[in-house]
């Protein structure tokens, strides 16, 4: 039964993407078929094999050590603020972003990350049927972040047509940056975080290929990566450390605002209607949760968490998910994979602002297709979660 629902869920995602397509005649089905098969194979390997367990275990072990090292710096600065044995969310989950950001800066400085991004992107371009720029951007988004990635291709931003610009922005919204993966792993199981990272990479191309199909000619298939301004090692390190701190503070501010607003709205709805705002959203999103493979008895709760992510951000939704200890392991896995992306309303402003900072006209173009961008990125999350459900008991 789970397999039938999952297949129907995948077909529903394709149908919704097809309805939103701006050029249905140009959809190329062969790359779509190849990528969906690859997603299924990768999900099976990661979730149901010894090799997958080893890969995820190694990935999780690396981040466990990194978070422990980050904890030494946090303890030195904030030691004594927290009660002994406790770890406030800001200190335990957000502050390690500063250290991870510093490591990313070091790997960038020594040209390790650019090398990895370039050649993974090159391999991807052979699979997805898109250009090298789109493939590079998808991999770079998953490492550098949804706004920082545009700086690395700023030479080409101004010359891109609307359809290619959409694909670049869709990749940025469908993935998550490596600097905050460690934070996710403290709230979700590592296997679901890693699975989402891999599936979303291909899912972004699948949905974009349906919603926004086009062919890149050989003349157009150019990748010009902007070299970072030459800095000394310690200048670079200081910049990345401060960038990481800014990200942590911004996430903390967003959490304070969104959690408080949702609490107030829930309270008002409870007084007026006798039901919370999140419960109403849960009923609206429950059919989608069910089609992703969530048992019907848990679909309203899962739908509420999914909606919370959409209207606020993934951190708020993850904190909500952690509270629901009654959910089955199957539901936890499916919803966890759905949550690991930047697909929410606030990301429209972040991405449009990042592009506008580099090219004002193109930033306005992004703002105009912002809702369609969110629509596509949400379908990517639904697709990844549905495929995950195929391999969960």
Image: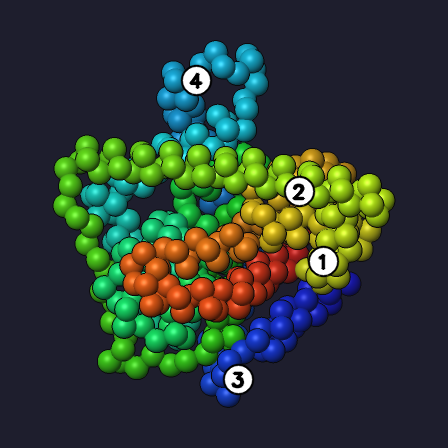
Residue tagged 3 = 24
Say which element carries label 4: helix
Whether residue 138 sits left or right of residue 223 in the image: it is: right
The vertical placement of 214 against 337, above or below, is below
Percent position (x, y) of residue 162? 39, 74
Residue tagged 4 = 78
Residue tagged 2 = 262
Q: Dot 4: few (<14), some (14–19), or many (≥20) neighbours within 10 Å?
A: few
Percent position (x, y) of residue 173? 47, 57
Percent position (x, y) of residue 285? 72, 58
Q: Are marks 3 and 2 in contact (CB under 8 Å)?
A: no
The vertical placement of 80 against 128, above or below, is above
Question: Which of the pair 251/10 is nearer the observer?
Answer: 251
Which mark sits nearer the N-terminus, 3 or 2? 3
Whether residue 163 sits left or right of residue 39 in the image: it is: left
Is residue 188 at least partly visible in the picture?
A: no
Percent position (x, y) of residue 357? 32, 56
Q: Dot 3: few (<14), some (14–19), or many (≥20) neighbours within 10 Å?
A: some
Identify the residue shown where x is 14% and y is 45%: 230
Residue tagged 1 = 285
Say which element carries label 1: helix
Picture colour scheme: rainbow
Q: Are marks 4 and 1 in contact (CB under 8 Å)?
A: no
Give the spatial CA distance, label 4 vs label 1: 41 Å
Give the spatial CA distance, label 1 vs label 3: 27 Å
């Amino acid at each position: 039964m789970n397999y039938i629902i999952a297949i129907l869920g995948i077909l529903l995602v394709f149908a919704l993407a097809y309805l939103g397509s701006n050029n249905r005649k140009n959809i190329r089905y062969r790359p779509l078929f190849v990528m969906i098969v690859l997603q299924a194979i990768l999900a099976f390997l990661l979730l149901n094999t010894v090799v997958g367990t080893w890969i995820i275990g190694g990935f999780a072990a690396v981040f466990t050590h990194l978070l422990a090292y980050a904890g030494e710096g946090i303890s030195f600065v904030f030691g004594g603020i927290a009660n002994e044995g406790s770890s406030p969310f800001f200190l335990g989950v957000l502050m390690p972003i500063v250290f991870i950001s510093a490591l990313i800066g070091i790997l960038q400085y020594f040209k390790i990350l650019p090398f990895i991004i370039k050649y993974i992107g090159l391999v991807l371009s052979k699979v997805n049927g898109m250009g090298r720029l789109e493939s590079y951007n998808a991999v770079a988004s998953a490492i550098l972040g949804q706004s920082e990635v545009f700086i690395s291709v700023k030479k080409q931003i101004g010359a891109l047509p609307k359809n290619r610009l959409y694909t670049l922005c869709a990749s940025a919204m469908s993935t998550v940056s490596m600097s905050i993966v460690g934070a996710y792993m403290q709230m979700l199981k590592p296997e679901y975080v890693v699975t989402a990272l891999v599936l979303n990479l291909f899912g972004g191309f699948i949905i974009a290929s349906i919603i926004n199909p086009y062919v890149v000619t050989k003349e157009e298939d150019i990748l010009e990566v902007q070299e970072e301004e030459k800095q000394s090692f310690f200048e670079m390190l200081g910049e990345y450390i401060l960038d990481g701190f800014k990200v942590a503070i911004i996430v903390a501010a967003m959490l304070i605002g969104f959690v408080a607003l949702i609490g107030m709205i829930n309270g008002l709805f409870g007084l007026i209607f006798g039901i919370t705002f999140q419960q109403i959203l849960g009923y609206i999103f429950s059919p989608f949760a069910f089609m992703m493979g969530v048992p019907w008895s848990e679909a309203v709760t899962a739908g509420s968490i999914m909606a919370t992510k959409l209207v606020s951000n993934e951190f708020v939704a993850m904190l909500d998910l952690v509270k629901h200890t009654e959910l089955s392991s199957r539901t936890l896995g499916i919803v966890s994979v759905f949550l690991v992306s930047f697909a929410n309303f606030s990301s429209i402003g972040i991405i449009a602002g990042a592009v506008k900072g580099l090219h004002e006209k193109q930033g306005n173009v992004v703002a105009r297709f912002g809702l369609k961008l969110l629509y596509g990125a949400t379908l990517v999350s639904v697709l990844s979660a549905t495929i995950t459900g195929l391999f969960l008991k």
